[in-house]
Amino acid sequence: MTDKIMRVPSDGAKGFRDLRGSELDLRSDLTNKIMKTYKSYGFDMLETPAVEPTAALGGFLPDTDRPNGGAFSFSTDEGDLTLRYDLTAPLARFVAGQGDGLTKPWRRSSVGPVWRNEKTAPGRYREFWQCDADLVGTPCVGADAEMISMADEALRNAGVGDFTIKVSNRKLLDGLLEGLGIADESRQRNIYRCIDKLDRLGTNGVAELLGPGRRDESGAYTAGQELSDPMIRAVIEFTAARDIDKVATAIGETITGNAGLREIEECLSLAREAGAPAVLDPTIVRGLSYYSGTVFEMDLQGEILDESGMPRRVGSIGGGGRYDNLIRRFTGRDLPCVGFSIGVTRLAQAMSMRSVQSERPLRPILICVVEEDGMMRAQTMARELRAQGMPAQVWYGASRNIGRQMKYADKIGASLAIIEGARERAAGEVVVKYLDLGREISQRAADRETWLSQEQQVSVAREDICLEIDAYLAK
């Protein structure tokens, strides 16, 4: 008589998938196109471990009712560890550890899987891939707008179809709650999480969560925030506003709210000038609690058929925003940052269900900003250069000093710098500074006078900037 063989079930863990063939090909293709776009904006790749010390990651996920706050954590002899739930929290730990060793503003990109112990649903998994980009060390609203513009360009280059980018600012909602007398940060975060469920639960469902509580179809009860009826109406009216004037009326006169209004007006203006399909949507708060200013989501249009054959709206395929306080946990000091993530897994699934530019090995071209009102013109020049395959970067430092910008250009190894001051703009020209040539002359020149006597820059007509740079690089 033979022993009975115990068979182990071959089912995988709930919320996880095995992938092969065309699914992996599509993910790889999307990832390559997205990361290529990031690279054209001058972003450096960073890879961090899949596992981080639990304390380093922090508890910023919205699923506070889930085990370990929605993360996958475990204990070891050397302390508690957690699988990373996004690529931003590890970035904060890395930046804090570098101290002053990073040249800022620093552009960083990352790609890889992340893990969240959240409830599963069609198209919602516990392991998924993200393509991240973050700009570290600048409070400039122009940087927020460029991230929105880069997200737009990355998705277009990936050929994803029609989408919109919904934009808001955390300070708008902070101002509203400030006016309502809700100052407790924990309660504010809970209200953010209620609003973040508007797309799924609708106005009535969110109103219940803001008030006495809500019982879902399964009978499960979620305690509410116990806001008064006038407070609930004020929050719901705020989320329904779709233009600046209505948002301003909803939030009233608060210092925080007014700051948010100024920031979002400038951000939307710059992003739209860049051609991004950016729209104001106060319902965008983002679930992660570390956001502090601009927030945005990329929303894929249309429907797909899910695994059961039912039509389903895709919705959000990524998002991000400004987080100026995240690194304070490590250093005791704020460091302004802005970033976003594209959910490659969700995007690939949507594209599979609804059934090259040549690379130029160029180093960065720095577009200098020497006047307070020069940001939009600088970003326009950068877009023109990128359209020709040139990796242009805009200066986002606080200083308008050209010497400081040239030092930054040298540190990032820029090959060229573009300068447009008041005199050049009046003449319809820009100055193209040949940094590589300057370095070469510096090595040959016997003294400063010899170095200064040799031509290292040229003034060209503004409309000829791409031709001039292309001709120089072809030499």
Image (spheres, rainbow, N blue to C red):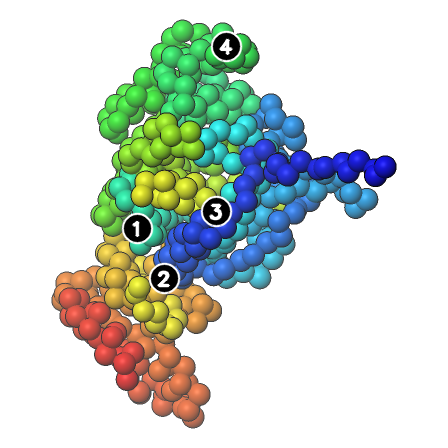
Instruction: Kindly identify which residue carries mark 3.
Output: 130
> Crowding near pointer 2: few (<14 within 10 Å), some, many (20+)?
many
At which x and y percent is residue 374? 26, 55
- Name the N-terminal-most of marks 2 and 4: 2
SS at circle 3:
strand
Q: Is residue 414 above or below residue 334?
A: below
Q: Amino acid at mark 2?
A: Ser
- Name the N-terminal-most of marks 4 and 3: 3
Q: Is residue 48 above or below residue 15?
A: below
- Residue 169 visible (yes or no): no
Q: Horizontal placement of 273 versus 393: left or right?
A: left
Residue 80: give its label: none
Q: Amino acid at mark 4?
A: Arg
Instruction: Kindly identify which residue carries mark 2.
Output: 40
Q: Amino acid at mark 3?
A: Gln
Q: Of the residues tagged 3 and 1, which is closer to the observer?
A: 1
Instruction: Kindly identify which residue carries mark 1.
Output: 159
Contact, CB < 8 Å: mark 4 with mark 3?
no
Q: Residue at 42% across / 29% down in the picture?
A: 308
Q: Is residue 172 above or below residue 269?
A: above
At which x and y percent is residue 357? 30, 65
Q: Horizontal placement of 242 versus 409: left or right?
A: left
Q: Horizontal placement of 182 versus 66: left or right?
A: left
At which x and y percent is residue 446? 43, 93
Q: Whole-Å distance between the Cαs marked 2 and 4?
A: 49 Å
SS at circle 1:
loop
Instruction: Kindly identify which residue carries mark 4.
Output: 215
